[in-house]
Image: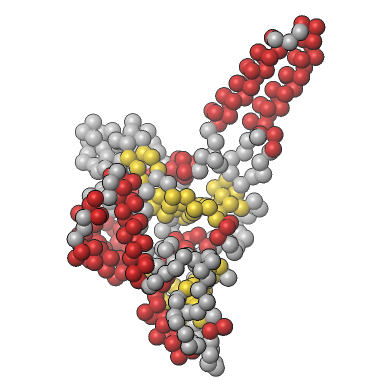
Amino acid sequence: MDMEAQRFLWEGAIPLQIHLHESEVTTLPSPPPALILAPRIGYLPLLASHLKPYFSSALPPGVDTIWFEYKGLPLKWFIPTGVLFDLLCAEPERPWNLTVHFRGYPGNILIPCEGEDSIKWSFINSLKEAAYIINGNCKNVMNMSQPDQVELWRSVLNGNLEAYQRVSSKLKLGAVGEMNSSSPRSGSNMGEIDVSGQVKPGRVPVRLYVWNVNEDFDELEDAPPIDSWDKLSYINRPVEIQGGGSYFTLHDAVKSLLPDYFVDKSLINAEALTVGGDDEQRVSSEDASDDTRVEEEVETSCDDHIKACYEYEEPEIKLVRIQGIEPKLEIPFSWVANNLMHPEHFLHICVYLKVPQVNNSMS
């Protein structure tokens, strides 16, 4: 794991310009927006300790329940701030203009958040899930002492990488081995390299956020806005790393997570050949006097099916963004998993897909 890359990520921050929603302003003039540098690995509700005192004099009476929106879209509090920014701002917006609310929590869209305790609970649960994916059990996380659990969470809150590594190393979640290593190295449970230099099978915890767009765009600033969570697909699925030394890229990983979009062309070809073979068998059972007519029908049907198969067009990956970085798709997935992982040991990947219209004849 590259320490310099880890430090770079932990120090990453997004400049925010946060406005209090006009419906909650009770003073004239309205309070100016708050300017905050928010950690990428943090969570928006954790900014409450800064925002509540700043806007308190303008708020109406009532119980405070903080939530945020961007261009009318309520923001999910359990998604790290940096991931929200990467996903919702195709063209990075700096500062990122958000609206904060302290009233009218949209419980029909967002799950309840009871402040820091809810976020800590969500973080620890994600860590347990990642441990189970990597090791097949989460006993190391479950058996963490209370002081260690507190120190781990405080390290994330304060952006203290050294404290985080001191505690997280006890969880033995490991790192991913290089897929095409030629020399023996020590490894770990996640893509571990054995004494022969080959990579043992392993699993990488991934959370994939997919935005499907039908219209094409050349510049990110021309991408249509995301105004509903219904327009996004959320895939919580590990990437299987197979042994054998094959070169496994980020592109391979994304395609493996989206089998409904990226169909194995060899399977399409096999299907076309199978249809042809089935039709030929049917011809042989027809009456000899109808041979010519049936043969023409079969040729037409088979040709149409093969044409549909070969005309299958894969979606175009318009953008892949991880930790604010847009890596080349040819980069080794092991490097991505080792260096761009979030503190809860999930790799959060944002993908924009240009999805072609599917020909109904393929169904």
Residue nearest the observer in this picture, 15 or 169: 169
Give the number of callouts: 0
Q: Residue furthest bottom?
A: 28
Judge whether 320 appears above or below 56 on screen.
above
Q: Position of residue 116 (x, y in %)?
A: 35, 71
Residue nearest the observer in this picture, 257 or 139: 139
Question: Picture quarter containing residue 42?
Answer: bottom left
Q: How is the image coloured?
A: secondary structure
| Residue shown at the point (52%, 62%) measured from the top left | 88
Residue 218 makes an appearance in the image: yes
| Residue shown at the point (46%, 65%) measured from the top left | 111
Horizontal side of 305 relative to 190 (left or right) equals: right
The quadrant of the image that shows the C terminus is: top right
Q: Position of residue 343 (x, y in %)?
A: 32, 59
Judge whether 207 appears above or below 103 on screen.
above
Question: Picture quarter containing residue 81?
Answer: bottom left
Judge whether 119 appears above or below 264 on screen.
below
Q: Position of residue 224 (x, y in %)?
A: 62, 60
Judge whether 280 appears above or below 116 on screen.
above
| Residue shown at the point (53%, 71%) measured from the top left | 106
Horizontal side of 268 relative to 53 (left or right) equals: right
Residue 35 makes an appearance in the image: no
Residue nearest the observer in this picture, 78 or 86: 78
| Residue shown at the point (26%, 37%) measured from the top left | 193
Q: Position of residue 4 (x, y in %)?
A: 29, 58
